[in-house]
Amino acid sequence: MRYKLSEMILRPTSVLAEAPGLLWDASAGTASYDEARQALRITGTVDLATYLNALSAEKWRRYCELDEFYVRLELSGDPCRVMGTAVGSHGPDIIVEPHPIVVFEGSEEPVSFEAKVPLFGAELAGVRIESEGTTLLHSGAYFCEVDESRPRPVELALCTTTFKNESYIVPNIEAVRDQVLGCDEPIASHFRMFVVDNGRTLDVGALSGGGVEVIPNPNVGGAGGFARGMMAALDWEATHVLLMDDDVTVLPESLKRTFALLSLVSDEYRDAFLNGAMLKMQAPGEFFEDVSRVTPTGVYRSIKPHGLPVDVPRNAAHIEAFDVELDRTYGAWWYSCIPTSAIRRNGLPLPVFVRCDDVEFGMRCDPTYMTMDGICVWHSMFEGRFRASVDEYMYVRNLLIANAVDDLGIDAAVLMRFSRTFGIYLRAMSYDICDLMLDGVADFLKGPAFLEHVNGSALFASVASRNERLQDVGELSGEDAAAVAAAPADPAYLDDRKRYPMAYKALEFVMPDTHMLPNALRTDVPAAVYYARGAYPLRRTLGHTTLVSYDTGGSRAHVRHMDLARWEGLRRRYRRVMRAYRDRGDEARREWADAAPLLTSREFWEGYLEEQAEA
């Protein structure tokens, strides 16, 4: 039987209109979508061996043990030749044969052609259309030949957790209902979409039905929302649950390719997790991440390079060539497909509300990961979205919990980085951030009883209320407005934070900060800094008693003033918390590890969700 692996995307809707290079390379011709004919209008030479329209030949061979592939094209218009091409991660594009694999003589009406796809061991295989005039490509697809008994039974549940984000979630529901559940392919009858509504603002009656189920849920964060979705998937008897953020744009074709891969995957990869890539919403052709690692120092590090333009075919092949089958890997939950057997075996997420939930789950399950070009979402970038409540309090607390539960052995490295970061923020007069960081350690030391019954939404709101409040610079008044005028945003500094010399980083450990200097060495002249993550501000902050912290665009700011009493109080608290960690850290880690089976059980989650709903 013939089994379709992927469909070419020819209509550049949504974010694709801003990055047509993801669909085709028209550097030697022209390509534009003809709405009236519903076809891609091609003149000259147009290559379709791209991030979204190539066949990931080496991945299909690796994951599914397939050896032969075919392409089906539907053409009309002027004559053309169809050349088989391949794109590798090194060297120029490879023209597979000097003669075409299809010769189209031209036709007013669409004509279908099929041909074998030549393979030269390159990551991506595809086709190049060389038109003698104007040729229309109405459709294209890659497929393989398999025995009728080969496809595995797959029941794929898509779970997305949302909190008052109708502008994204409603269009995604409509796209899934129309193009996945409403299509004439096998996925339509083996797919269900569960929308877990933590904000309880969606119209359940209007949006549910036809394979979509909206589930009102208390605000228990991403971890609680995805736990609820996992339970719904298990009740539906899904074989796989696909976790996806609500604030993304997803192509229905990515869901179809996911289903095809799961259906044909070999025994070696049947228990593997599949993670889709995150591309940048603000720069749709740029790759951000698909699978990452937790390093021995507790840092999250992407396996593949951030920011690579995959609308360039060679870069798309380069991304495809990376090996993600490494130790200590995890896939973020913007698009993560998990076999439900792993949930039954390893449990549900920890009730940590947000941050590190996906990291911890990946560490606990320790799966093999699969990735593939063209299985992806577009997500708004995290740059400039820093919130101390999430990026410091939740990160510190939850990473320490993950270290304890999964026996990562990184607590010493985490505490070393914690101490250094704390010192940087203290120098930069980020007193509230420092307090939140210490709260993270202190709450970890309280042990698992702290999380079992705490109102997660109320706790999150409480810590979020202490985030630094940036305002539009035009709304600041009095001394704050004067400080902004004296220290305007400095774009060079915002770039400088990314390539801060190592020598300056070393100085952080030995140089005093402004709080330690005598009055004679201090100045009231304000200085501009970047508000997030400390940004190694020593050489710009030393001696200044007023700092204007700006966002990445320089349009919003918060003015900080030196407070010696607060500074000294935080230093004393730091010493107390570190002493408490030395005294109780081992005991707390054992408590978290012992409690993990309960905290990740369905019994716990059902009771916890009921308790949170009544809170």
Image (cartoon, helix red, strand yellow):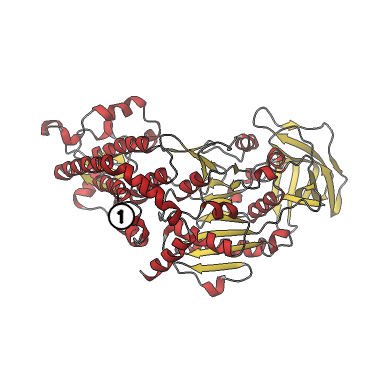
Q: Quadrant of residue 116?
A: top right
Foreground of the two, 352 or 8: 352
- Give percent across and percent down for residue 321: 63, 34
Instruction: Say if residue 45 shows up in the picture.
Output: no
Specify the amino acid type for callout 1.
Answer: Val
Instruction: Say if residue 180 shows up in the picture.
Output: yes
Q: Residues within 10 Å of mark 1 (few under 14, many from 20)?
A: some
Left or right: 603 as drawn, with respect to 559: right
Q: Quadrant of residue 548?
A: top left
Q: Name the residue at the top extreme.
A: 503
Q: Which residue is mark 1?
A: 463
- Give percent across and percent down for residue 568: 16, 41
Left or right: 332 as drawn, with respect to 482: right
- Give percent across and percent down for residue 252: 64, 56
In the rendered image, the quadrant that contains the C terminus is bottom left
Left or right: 177 as drawn, with respect to 445: right
Residue at 36% in and 61% down: 457
Foreground of the two, 458 or 10: 458
Quick one: SS at disc 1? Answer: helix
Q: Name the residue at the bottom extreme.
A: 205
Note whether 248 is above or below 561 in the view shown: below
Left or right: 556 as drawn, with respect to 520: right
* Count of marks placed on residues: 1
Foreground of the two, 328 or 101: 328
Foreground of the two, 98 or 481: 98
Residue at 30% in and 46% down: 441
